Amino acid sequence: MMPFPVTTPGSQQTPPPPKRCGISSPISLAAPKETDCVLTQKLIETLKPFGVFEEEEELQRRILILEKLNNLVKEWIREISESKSLPQAVIENVGGKIFTFGSYRLGVHTKGADIDALCVAPRHVDRSDFFTSFYDKLKLHEEVKDLRAVEEAFVPVIKLCFDGIEIDILFARLALQTIPEDLDLRDDSLLKNLDIRCIRSLNGCRVTDEILHLVPDIDNFRLTLRAIKLWAKCHNIYSNILGFLGGVSWAMLVARTCQLYPNAIASTLVRKFFLVFSEWEWPNPVLLKEPEEQNLNLPVWDPRVNPSDRYHLMPIITPAYPQQNSTYNVSVSTRMVMIEEFKQGLAITHEILLSKAEWSKLFEAPSFFQKYKHYIVLLASAPTEKQHLEWVGLVESKIRILVGSLEKNEFITLAHVNPQSFPAPKENPDREEFRTMWVIGLVLKKPENSDVLSIDLTYDIQSFTDTVYRQAINTKMFEVDMKIAAMHLRRKELHQLLPNQVLQKKKTHSAEDSEDGMSVPSPTSIMKTGPTTGSCQGRNSPAPAIMVAPVTNVQVTEVSLQQANPSASLGDSGESIPQTASQPALCPPPKPTVARVVSSTRLVNHPPRPSGSTATNIANPIVGV
């Protein structure tokens, strides 16, 4: 079928513009060719061994479990209605419903994945009812295990395992007397007169439903998203909490690609995904639809009004009101890493198009531990398994703060945290202790007029540990012997902490592999932090005691990060990627210059620097990398 009507010579008729899909016209309306269909089938076959498709039997089991849960909700709401003496006519039609969102609702969940669910109740059912009587009702159900309520969370939730399937259930009370079966949560009027916790709980369902509504072909969208999510996980860039992208952000990028190529199928959409976002002019926002103001006085993402929104580096805006940026955690380093991966993905998919490579190459995990010369290793330890689980969650949620601090160092070009954590060896084999570690790769910049670089990271790590301990104490989570340690390791020293099967992967080319002139002769620097008392920070605020080995020096001949742009020769350069015309280009905040060059042959004691509003007297080492 022709995308435009044919006109006879001399006719004054002009072809209509292409139908808008999203905020702009499509880039291409080309229909798939036979080669595209063959490549898509090959992509499906490549994805199958990774477990991204669930068997029909398992899918039916999930549907049955959700049906049971939905019936429990209806039964519970009827019981609450009777206890509050509602008229019988209302009780018979009071309703109540379980909605799903996230990967399950999008249709891209993997084998064994959990389900995100939302319990929607009428106005006479309170949140306190949800966390008491409904919780008790679940507790009595024989198929429910591992039941726990997290009532004080930013988005309150009940977590459980229902017949072997992990489910997280949120709660929202609508200003309705009854909940109809055909309720459409995308209706903005439902948000009127709701408290903020209900609005947050509804947000996941509303965003997911809008995404599905805004893509031209749901099946093509789903297959493409499965491939992109797998690629992101294999390349260690799937983690919202650490400053990369989470599931909903990847879904919105794929949805935007589908809008720009509405007739394309998965093999083409995967390649176009890498083309579009390797050339995207960040921080222009990615939008699936024009933002709409509903006059409900809810905060929305708008850099023209909110100064803090102007500092977001990679904004991807949720399509449901109130619009929010789903990528506010992205930092300079994580954006740099993702853009580099987009460009490499484009090069690989071009090879696949030319039959020079198979789809499996796209999902090969790069060796993070061969990519950089220098690494910072963070270790979190706690004496019991339960304390360790809580402590690790808190430390991981704050690592992006440390990365942001490292980025401000004038001699650190990039700080790349690996989203995968690893079990750490025990410090004392005779003592019960649970330890987890994260690894941050560093790219360093050569100082002017010098071949020696020493960097003092004391204040950066002290500020990070202060933040973690402060929150642990404020939330009453902190226990004695919860500790954080930080150390610098060179690439060849990683085997001291990491198993060989992690390190012995295919070595990937990186700009730092040319640093043959770099030598690091002196011992590894280690910073151990733990809560102490008696400092001027106050009795309830831990002051980290920091100890290090002698300074480590680096002979730098050349440090650079080269990012090739494969799209220049891939035949796609003629395509113009539409940016957001309605939003101004946003510039990231300027980096403050931090002078940290010190003597490379002796320990330099700087005056104590403040931590928060008070000062802490600590040994001030030089962490040389």
Image: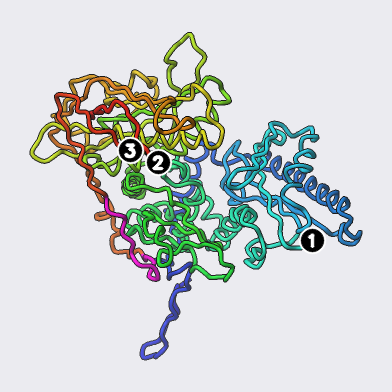
The residue furthest right is: 88
Q: Residue at the spot x=30%, y=30% of the render? A: 375
Q: Are marks 1 and 2 in contact (CB under 8 Å)?
A: no
Is any part of residue 412 visible from this angle? yes
**First along the sequence among labels 3 and 2:** 2
Q: Residue at the spot x=63%, y=55% of the render? A: 202
The magenta region covers 578-591
Q: Is residue 580 magenta?
A: yes
- The CA distance from mark 3 to mark 2 is 21 Å
**First along the sequence among labels 3 and 1:** 1
**Residue 183, image x and y in percent?**
71, 62
Label 2 sits on a secondary structure element that is helix
Residue located beneath label 3 in the image: 610
Q: Are marks 3 and 2 in contact (CB under 8 Å)?
A: no
Residue type marked 1: Thr
Task: Answer above or below: position of 422 versus 74.
Answer: above
Quadrant location of the C terminus in the rendered image = top left
Residue type marked 3: Pro
- The CA distance from mark 1 to mark 2 is 44 Å
Q: Nearer the viewer, mark 1 or mark 2?
A: 2
Residue type marked 2: Arg
Label 1 sits on a secondary structure element that is loop
**Residue 265, image x and y in percent?**
47, 56
Q: Residues within 10 Å of mark 2 (few under 14, many from 20)?
A: many
The residue furthest left is: 449
**Front one among 568 and 85:** 85
Residue located beneath label 1 in the image: 178
**First along the sequence among labels 1 and 2:** 1
Label 3 sits on a secondary structure element that is strand
Residue located beneath label 2 in the image: 400
